[in-house]
Image (tube, grey):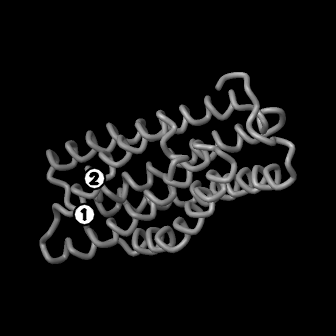
Amino acid sequence: MTGRTLPAPHDAGWLRDARRARTLSLATLVWLGAESVLGIAAGLGAHSVALIGWGVTALVEAAASLIVVWRFTGARTASAHAEERARRAVAISFWLLAPYLVLHVAHDLDAGHRAVPSTLGIVVTAASVVGMPLLGTAKRRLGARLGSAATVGEGTQNLLCAALAAGVLAGLALNRAGWWWIDPAMAVLLAAVAAREGRRAWRGGHCCH
């Protein structure tokens, strides 16, 4: 694949989709910057492993967005070699998340931290539940049309973020009923999913879906 050119790179529709992918990734960077700061702040205040992990996930997603912006900028837009490098970089961004979450869960369980309700956390995660699926779905569709596993992988990370946000919301609510273990369980589940998605991205399997 290295050195070859993607099919019909100068087709107007393909180039338009490439610009849309780059624009969506740039917009996502702004969203994730605010989401990460607010999510981590809320998580620290609530001693919520999943909420902090979700905030860190936003940073990982931001890395994936930067990769896609890089991939569809200048001469790299029509480069299959750039797509290959971007695809593997997105896979690595998934793998950066998994060990962090596991270690963070172990630390907080050992310290006896328990999540407490957080108004800020609820507001920020609720916004993610609503907005991230729209971004993720749009990127996956664009990635499929572009033949770009990197773009599809970034969209998958957005969907993963929304799923975790929903889990965090449930964990904060159920913690009141004494189900404190829901919060770290969601973080561990995210770690497993991130590892799996990283493996699929490395192999280029995202474009098959």
Which residue lies under the disc numbered 1? 115
Specify the quadrant that holds the N terminus.
top right
Q: Is residue 81 above or below residue 104?
A: above
- The x, y position of residue 119, in whole percent, is 39, 75
Name the residue located 41 percent from the left edge and 44 percent from the top edge: 197
Question: In this image, 208 relative to 190: left or right?
Answer: right
Q: Which of the pair 185/178 is nearer the observer?
A: 185
| Residue at which label 2 appears | 189
Q: Is residue 184 left or right of residue 55?
A: left
**SS of the residue under disc 1:** loop
**In the image, is residue 12 above or below residue 45?**
above
Q: What amino acid is found at the position of numbered circle 2 in the picture?
A: Leu
At label 1, the amino acid type is Ala
Q: Quadrant of residue 116?
A: bottom left
Asked whether the viewer can see residue 3, the reply is yes
Element type at mark 2: helix
**Figure check: 206 above or below 43:** above
Report the mark closest to the observer, 2 or 1.
2
Residue 171 at x, y percent in the picture: 26, 68
Crowdedness of circle 1 by 10 Å Cα count: few (<14), some, many (20+)? Answer: many
From the viewer's perspective, is 62 left or right of 70?
left
